[in-house]
Image: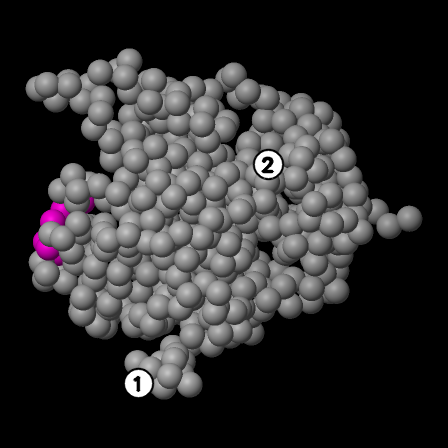
Amino acid sequence: MTTPLLSLQGITKRYPGVVANQDVSLTVMPGQAHAVLGENGAGKSTLMKIIYGSVKPDEGQVVFNGQPVQIRNPQEARKLGISMVFQHFSLFDTLTVAENVWLGLDKSMSLAEVTERIVVKASEYGLDLEPERPVHTLSVGEMQRVEIIRALLTEPKLLILDEPTSVLTPQAVEKLFVVLHKLVSQGVSILYISHKLHEIRALCSACTVLRGGQVTGVCDPSQETNASLSRLMIGAEPPALAPKPRSPGEVVLSVNGLQLNKQDPFGVDLQGIDLQVRSGEVVGLAGVSGNGQRELMWALSGEDTRSPASSITLAGQGVGHWAPRARRSLGLHCVPEERLGRGAVPSMSLAHNLLLTRSEALGSGGWIRMGTLADQARSIIARFKVKASGPDAAARSLSGGNLQKFIVGREISAAPKLLIVSQPTWGVDVGAAAQIRAEILALRDAGCAVLVVSEELEELFEISDRLHVIAKGRLSPSLPRAEATVERIGEWMSGLWPSPAQEVQHAQA
C-alpha cells in the first residue's frame, strides 16, 4: 500500500480554559485533496498550525513521508515540503509584495529573481499581482493572492489552505481550482479548510470532520450533499432565509457625484459615484477586489474626510468632512473587511474592543463603567454564539470566524440607522453565516438602511434588494435583485454595463 504523506496520531493541544484539539488522528495520502471541516472554533486552524510548526502539540505524533518528525517552526516545515496559506495574513504592511514573498523563500534567489517568478506564476494562475506594490495598499482579496502565490512558489509536497477563497470572486475561485486540480494530478497533497461546502465537494476526495476539537467523522465529500455535510459539521442544517418583500422608506445615505483621487500610487480613483440607500432596504455592492471598494468604504465611514461636504449626505446632512465618531452620532455603524487591526485591536479584550465604536459604558468625565461594558460583551457573545472564554478574552485569541461574529454583533446590536458592512460572513461556518444574514435582514425589516460589500455573489443574491457593481472606481446603475444573474453581474464586473441612455431604451422596450 502507498505510504501516507502525512499522518497525525493522537494530537492534543490545550490552552487555558479550552482544549483546542483532543486525540485527533488524520491521514493524508500523496496526491490527495483532503478537507478539514468544522464550525468556527472546532480546532481546525490550531491543527493546521501544528502541522506547519507554528504551534507545538501537548501530546501526539506527526509522521511525514513515513518518518516521525518534530516540526519546531515554519522554516522546518517548508524544508520538509509543507507550505500554508493562513486565514489571517502573515504579511508586513510596509514591505512590497515581492519582499514579502522573498522572506518566505530560499535566499539563494535574489529579489529580482523572485519578482520575475511572481509575475510568471501570477500570470499562470490568473491571480493578478504587482510585485512592487506595498502591501498596505492592497485590499484583503489582493493580500489573499499574495499568500497563495507565496505558498505555490515553494513547490510544496503538502499545501495547507485555510479559507483560501473567502475573499476571492467566483471567477478567481474557478481559476484557483484549475491550479489545485493540476497540483493534485502532479502528486501534491492539499489540506483544505473552507466553509463553502460546494468547494469541498468539488475539490476533495476525503474529509475529516471536527467538532469541539475532536474527530467526529470521516467521509468522501463528493458522495455527500451540502445538507449532509452541514449535519456532520454542526449537527443540523442551517435555517433557510425567507426575506420578506417590503417597500423602502426615506433616503438615509446619498452619494452624489463623488470624485476622489487615490491616496497612494496603487489605489483607485473614485469617479462620479452616485449611490442611494433607503431605510428598510439592503443594497449589495459586488466587484472584483481592488476596484475601489476600499476607497469608497473609507469615504463613507469617515476614515477619508477629503470628500466635499455635500457629496455624501447622511440623514439629510452633508458629512463629507465628518470623522467617523461624528457620523456615528447620526446612526452610522461600519464593519470593515479587515478584522484584526481595523475591526479590532488584537491585544485588547473583547469588552474593551467595544469602546472602538460604542460609548454606552462611558460615564461622566470619561470613566468606563466596567460592569456595563462586560455585560454588553456577554450579551453579544451569547446572541451571536461567539466561542470565547468571556468578555476578558483577547481578540486575537478567537478563531477568525468567532471574531467576525463578535465584530458584526457589536455593530448590529448598536441598532444603527445605517449599517455598512464589508465581507460580513468572511471565514464563518454555514450556521453562523445564516445567522449573520438573518440578523442583517432583521435589521432591514426594523427600518435600518444597509449597504453590504461582498465578493460572495450567492450572499448578495440572498439578502440584497438591489445591487450595484463597482469596477475601476466607477459604479454601475442599480439593478433589482429579481433582474440580477451571475452572468450579468460577472459581465458588469469588467465595467461593461449599459449607459443611462441604454437603460432608458431598455425600460421603454
Q: How is the image coloured?
A: one colour
Percent coordinates x, y for residue 391 in the rendering: 38, 21
- Mark closer to the observer (1, 2): 1
For the residues labelled 1 and 2, the Cα–Cα distance comes to 48 Å
Residue positioned 18% across, 66% down in the render:
256
Residue 86 vs 61, above or below: the answer is below
Horizontal relation, residue 105 to residue 279: left or right: right
Residue 4 vs 458, above or below: the answer is above
Residue at the extreme top: 371
Give, as a single range, the part of the protein colored magenta. Answer: 318-325
- Secondary structure, mark 1, is helix
**68 or 198: which is nearer to us?**
198
- Residue ID for mark 1: 501
Residue at the extreme right: 1
Q: Main secondary structure of the magenta part?
A: loop
- Secondary structure, mark 2, is loop
Residue positioned 21% across, 72% down in the render:
272
- Residue ID for mark 2: 39
Residue 367 vs 406, above or below: the answer is above
Tag 2: residue type? Glu
Percent coordinates x, y for residue 81 in the rendering: 64, 52
Residue 66 inside the magenta-drawn segment: no
First reached walking from the N terminus: tag 1 or tag 2:
2
Residue positioned 55% across, 20% down in the render:
18
Horizontal relation, residue 268 to residue 329: left or right: right
Residue positioned 58% across, 68% down in the render:
175
Q: Quadrant of residue 153?
A: bottom right
**297 or 111: which is nearer to us?**
297
